[in-house]
Image (tube, helix red, strand yellow):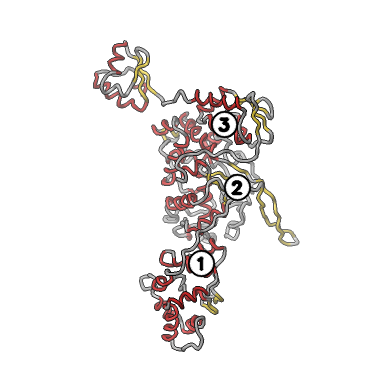
Amino acid sequence: MTEYGEPGTLDEYLNAYTVPTLKKLAGLLASGLPTRKGDLVALIRRELEDPDRLRGIWERLDPLQKAAVAEALHSPLHRLDGAMFQAKYGRSPDWGRISPYGEPEEPSLLWLFLYNGIIPPDLAARLKSFVPPPSAAELHTGDELPATVIQKEYLYTSAGRREKYTEIPLTRCETERMALHDVHAVLRLIEAGKVRVSDKTKQVTAASARAIANVLEGGDFYPLDEETDGWQTAPGPIRAFAWPLILQSAGLATPSGTKLQLTPAGKKALASPPQEVIRRAWDRWLKSTLLDEFNRVHAIKGQRSRRAVTAVAPRRQAIVKALAACPPHKWISFDEFSRFMRASGFTFEVARDPWHLYIEDPHYGSLGYSGFSGWHILQGRYMMAFLFEYAATMGIIDVAYIHPSGARRDYHNLWGADGLDCLSRYDGLMYIRINGLGAWCLGLTEEYVPSLPTGPQTLRVLPNLDVVATAPLPPGDVLFLERFTERMSDVVWRIRPMRLLEAVEEGYSVADVQAFLRAKAGGLLPDNVEVFFQEMAERASRLVDRGPAWLIEAQDAALAQLVVNDSELRSLCMLAGERYIVVPADAESAFRRALHKLGYAVIGMAHHR
C-alpha cells in the first residue's frame, strides 16, 4: 500500500517482502534462485509481466483459487472480500501453509496474484485480458416447506453432556391476504379513536396492541396472552406493534396527544385499494426514521449511545436489493437468504463501533471483543426484525416460523448470554417467500397479480353454496371463510350474499373470495357458483364509496340553485334534491371561502368543524 493507503504497484508489494518470503514465492516459478533481494524481485516480476507466462501460472491454479483471483479482479480496488468469498463458495481458497503470524511458510500460487488480499493495479490490467468475471452467487430455493424443523439442545447429567433433538412444527403464514385486510382494519380502529401511542416514542401501548391484534386476520404471529414459565421468552406483539408505526410513517395517521387519528390521506386510504395503500406504506417505511428495527432486539444494549449504530436507510436498501434478486413464489430459508446477501455483496453495517454494544455488562459483555459481533449477531438479527415485523406485516413476504425460544444457538458463546433462551423475539423466523404483493412492491412485476393460496385441497364447494371442509383448516382460513359464510356445522359453511357484501365493504373483493375457494377446492367451482360470484361482483362494483361529505340544507330551492351554479362553487359541491347541497369533506375549506365571497355562511359551521 502507498503512504495514502492506495494499492501500490507489483514492484512495491514485492519489495515489501523479506528475502526468505521472496525465495519461497520465486521457488514456485523457477529453480536455481538468486540470493539478492533485487534479483528475486526481478525474477518474479519478469514472470508476471510476460503475458504467456502469466497465463500459464493462472492455468496452474485450482478452480477455487481462480475464483478468488476473479472475485478480487472484478471488485473495487481489486480487493478480495474474504467473508463474501466464504459465503459464496463455502470455504476459503488454498493459500498453502501459513504461520500463526500470517506469514507464508509454504505459499500456494495464489500469493503471486494477491498481496495482502489485493491485486496490484498493474498486474490487474494484465489479468483482465483473460480472467473472466466471477459467476453470480447461487440461491437455493424450494417450492415446498418441511412440516417440522429439528431443534437441538444440550442436556447436562452426571454422565456428561448429551444432545437432544426435538421436532418442532413449523407455522406457515401467507401474509398477502392478511395484510390487505389488516391495513383497512387498523385504519378503521384508529378512526374510531381506539389506538393509543406513547407521546415520546410513538409506539403503541400494550392495551392498544391487544385491540389491534383482535382485528388482525388470524391474530398476531404469536399469542399475546402466551403463558411462560419464566424461562421462556414471550415474543409479544409483532404485527400489532408494527402497524401503528407503519401507518404513521406513511402519513396516514398522526398522534393527537396520546391517541392516533387519521390524517386526510388516511381517510382517503379507507376508500383506496388496499394494495395501493400498502405499496405507499412500504415505500415510506424504507425511508422512515420513526424506528430503528434493531431497537427491538432488547438483549443487545447500548444502542442509545452516541454513534453506536448506523443509519437505518442503507440497511433497508441492502435487504430490499437482495429481495429483488430473489425469485417470487419460492421458499428460501432465512439462513440461506442471509448467506446469499453476503455472497452477492448486499452487505451493510449495524454498528459504527461494536464496543458500544453489549449483553448484560458493558465491559465483560461488550460486542467489541473479537468474534462477538459477527454478521449473524448484528446484521442477522436486524434482518430478522425488518423481515418478520415489517416486510411480513405489510404482506411483502410470506413467513414460516417457530417459537423463538431455543430456535438458534449461534449466540451462546457470548458473555452474559447463558440465561437467554433467544437473542431476539424474531429468532424463530425460518423461511421467507416473496408473494404477489411483494413482487409488485419490489418492482419485480408491473402490475399487481394476487397470489393464490397454496397447499393441499381442503375444501369442497357444492352447487347449493355449501362449503365443506375435507381436511383440518388452519385458523387463518377459518377466519377468512367466516367473513362471507354462515357456519352450519363443524365442517360445513354456507355462502351468504349479505355476508359476502359485508366482506366487500371491509376491503375484500369478490375475486379474492373466488380465488381462495378455487385454490382450496383444487380447481373450478360449480357452474352456478361461478355465475353467482359474477353477479355479486357486478353488484358490488356499481356503488363506490367516495368518502365522507358535508350535507347543507338551503332555506329554499332558489338559494340552493344559486350556490351550486356559482362559477367558483359548482366544482366544489352538488345538488341533492331541491334544497340540499353536498360538499366532499376534502373540499370543505375551499367551499367555505367561495361561499363567503358569494355573501353567505352556514349556520352550525363552528359545531360541524
Q: Which residue is mark 1?
A: 67
Q: Which residue in the rendered view is the most extreme toward the right?
A: 159
Is residue 27 placed above or below 246 in the rendered structure? below
The residue labelled by disc 3 is 514
| Alpha carbon separation for disc pair 2 and 1 | 30 Å
State which quadrant residue 96 falls in. Answer: bottom right
C-alpha separation, residue under disc 3 versus residue under disc 1:
51 Å
Spatial separation of the CA atoms under disc 3 and disc 2: 23 Å
Residue density around tag 1, few if under 14, some if 14–19, many if 20 or more, within 10 Å: many
Q: Amino acid at mark 1?
A: Ala
Give the labeled residue for mark 2.
143
Q: Quadrant of the C terminus?
A: top left
Residue drawn at x 32%, y 24% is 572
Question: Which image quadrant: the N terminus?
Answer: bottom left
Helix, strand, or loop for circle 1? helix
- Vertical arrangement, residue 45 with respect to residue 457, above or below: below
Q: Residues within 10 Å of mark 3 (few under 14, many from 20)?
A: some
Q: Image quarter for residue 41?
A: bottom left
Q: Is residue 425 visible?
A: no
Q: Position of residue 362 (x, y in %)?
A: 51, 58
Find out whether the residues at labels 2 and 1 contact each other: C-beta distance under 8 Å. no
Query: What residue type is disc 2 on?
Result: Asp
Q: How many residues crowd mark 2 within 10 Å: few (<14), some (14–19), many (20+)?
A: few
Residue sitting nearer the eye, 291 or 446: 446
